[in-house]
Every structure is written in structure tokens, then in C-alpha cells.
Amino acid sequence: MKTTKILNVSIDEISLGELLEQLGSRGGVVFTPNVDHVMKLQKDREFYDIYQYSDYRVCDSKVLYYAAQVLGQSIPEKISGSDLFPAFYHYFRNCENTRIFLLGAAEGVAPKAQQKINQLVGREMVVDCYSPPFGFEHDKAECQRIIDRVNRSEATVLAVGLGSPKQEKWIIRHRKYLTRIKTILAVGATIDFEAGEKPRSPKWISEAGLEWLFRLSIEPGRLWRRYLFDDLPFVWLILQQKLNWYAVPYFSQNSPRIPSDRLGRKPLLGNLLEEAGLITSKQLDLALVTQAQADMRLGEIVAGQGWLPQETIDFFADQLPQLSKNTQTYPLGHYLKAAKLLNEAQINTILTEQPHRKLKFGELAVQKGWLKSETLETFLHYLKRDSDCLVAS
């Protein structure tokens, strides 16, 4: 997937429709970077490390959208958490395997959002919700109670509205314990919007890049420092990047990293490549260390190390998860060639020998040592899937 680099943050060049389609086929963790995130990522090493473990980073801010244009880069559209979440539950409204848990907002707010969403979609799509107490993230017992409640609910989707960077840090540290959750959306104040507790800015204000001003007028006591002090240097930093003066923050090369065992599951692409037997666990760990130090996408590092061709990485990132949704299927060899795992000569050899050997195409490729059995199983898994819904297992 192509990305746009704004300061030390890579933002995916993806439309809302493409994002929903990919979440339907493979799930993942979605972060929604805005100006406030970007500024925090200049100073907070822990937040920076956490960000590397998200599967999608979509533009939450029209200001970032315009900044990309100033830098000569491209973001297809703004996808704020408050736009993504309603689009998500409408898109999957008829998918019975999509069950949502709401985590966040003030006491009594999440149940209102739950009721309203379920009325809109016409079924019990939001299966449970919980508003944790202040400071819960430092209470191991409370975090465990939340994990147990989410798991008991049998939800497959977790929408977290705890504010940034608290929500992102909690998600990555605990995602490996959420046994049924396939998709996690970091949605900020969206639960409040869904419940009708806070007003959303008019669309024209949002499109003009002035949503921050609207929110400041609604909550000046809480937001004045963020918008008028913390985020103000953003313009100067963008100018530095435009003039090639911007330097990656000091911490990204000299501060200690968070141990990987505290960061939950590895990124989805990394897991997929490892499970397919294309990279080792040691290589993936090394790539993750390099990623946090050099601010590069995982696929760029794997290709740069020479472990896999870029075509293979691109296929596993973008095309493989979509195979289950294709109405027209091709022979296995077609996909293996597209992924640059077999060449034309190897495919022709297998096709020539198949009638005599009485083996399936993939079995013969594995027997010849041209393909690992794990890689074959991964391809067959996606080719046989026929559900457009998020599943629990």
C-alpha cells in the first residue's frame, strides 16, 4: 500500500471504500492520525513505537490532507474516526458475524450510543459497552476485567474512544489478549457523537479544515492548550519538510524502545509473511526494531534487506487478502506467479508433470522444493474463503 510521509508519520493512501473492503477480508488495527497525533509523535517515543504496530493509518484531518498537497504528496480523502465508524457499521449491517463492543466515553454515554446504533442497523450489532474509570490504564486488575468482558461478549470488533494517545497505547498493549477481536478502531470522541452527547461540526466547516476551531468553541477549557499551543508548531515543521530541513526526532535513534513483548501482536503484514514461511520470526523482530529506529514501513525494510522481492510483499499486503472476494478465480499458478513465488518455467514444468505424477499443482510445487507448505496453505486459505463478513475465528 502506498503511503504519504508527513513529518515522521506514514499515512496510507487509501479511500474509505477500500479501507472497509480490506477490513472485511482481514481486519486489523486502525489509527486515525491528525495534527495532534503528529505533534505528539515528535516527542513521545512510546507513542511513536506504538504507532508502528497499527495496520492502517488513515488521515483524520483536513489540515493533514492540505499539508500533503503542500508537500507534493497525495491522500485520497480525509477519513476521520467519526466518519469511519458510522460508515463501518452501515457497511456491515447485514453481516451477522460483525459484532461490536464500545469501550470509552463518560459513564452512561456508551449505552446511549449502543441503543442508537442498533436502532439504525436494525439488529443487536453493538453487543456490549463499557466506560472505564479515570486512570484505569494503570490498573492491571481493571484492564483484565475489561479484557474478560470484551471476550465474553463475543464481539469481533472493538471501537475504542479513550482519547489519544491513551487509546492507541491501550489497544496495542492488550490486543493479543482479545481473543475474538479481528478489527480495532481507535475512534476518539466518536462514541460521544453517536450518543448525541457532543455536536459534530457542520460538513462545510470540516471540509474547510476548520473542525478544530469548531471543537475549540465547544470545549475551550479542555482543548485550548492542544490547538493554540501544542499543535501550533505544526505549520513550521511542514515548512521545514518542504524545504528539506526537517530531521527525524532525536528520540527515534537514541531513546530506548519499548520491549516487543509489551506491544501485543505483530503488524498484520508481518504476521502474514511469517505464517506463510516467507520470513522467520527473528527476521520479523529485526525488521520491527529497524522500523521504530528508521521510521519505515515494514514492507520497505523486508525488501531492503533482500529477504523478499517487493512484488511478493505488495501481493501479500494488497492482493492476497482480497482473493476471497474475487468473483473470478484463476489457477493457483497464476497467483503464485503474480506474487513472484514461481516463475514461468517452474509453472510449465509442474503443468507438464502433473498428468503423470497425479498430484495437485501446489503439492507438486512443494515436493520440488519451490514452495513451502506453509506458503501453499496460506494461499489455499484465502482462495477458499467465501465470506465478506468479519468472522470470530
Image (tube, rainbow, N blue to C red):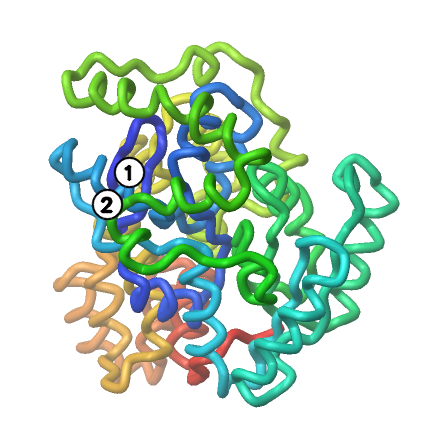
Please identify the quarter of the rendering in which residue 266 is found.
Answer: top right
Q: Is there a contact, CB below 8 Å, between mark 2 and mark 1? A: yes
Give the left or right position of residue 237, taking residue 60 as reference: left
Q: Residues within 10 Å of mark 1 (few under 14, many from 20)?
A: some
In the rendered structure, which disc, 2 or 1, sits on the residue that comes first in sequence?
1
Question: Considering depth in this image, is 206 or 368 the residue closer to the camera?
Answer: 206
Q: CA distance from mark 2 to mark 1?
A: 5 Å
Above or below: residue 55 compared with residue 68:
below
Please identify the quarter of the rendering in which residue 16 is found.
Answer: bottom left
Above or below: residue 373 compared with residue 60:
below
At x 82%, y 50%, the residue is 144
Please identify the quarter of the rendering in which residue 375 is found.
Answer: bottom left
Question: Considering depth in this image, is 134 or 351 the residue closer to the camera?
Answer: 134
Horizontal and vertical percent for residue 170?
65, 43
Asked whether the viewer can see residue 370, the reply is no
Horizontal and vertical percent for residue 181?
62, 64
- Element at label 2: helix
Horizontal and vertical percent for residue 211?
37, 47
Q: Residues within 10 Å of mark 2 (few under 14, many from 20)?
A: some
Question: Considering depth in this image, is 140 or 130 the residue closer to the camera?
Answer: 130
Horizontal and vertical percent for residue 40?
48, 27
- Element at label 1: helix
At x 53%, y 23%, the residue is 44
Tell me, for residue 303, which label it has, or none. Answer: 1
Residue furthest to the right: 141
Tell me, for residue 5, which label it has, or none. Answer: none
Asked whether the viewer can see residue 38, the reply is yes
What amino acid is at disc 1? Answer: Ala
What amino acid is at disc 2? Answer: Gln
Which residue, given by chain and number where applicable, does mark 2 sit on?
310
At x 28%, y 80%, the residue is 326
Give the left or right position of residue 340, taking residue 47 as reference: left
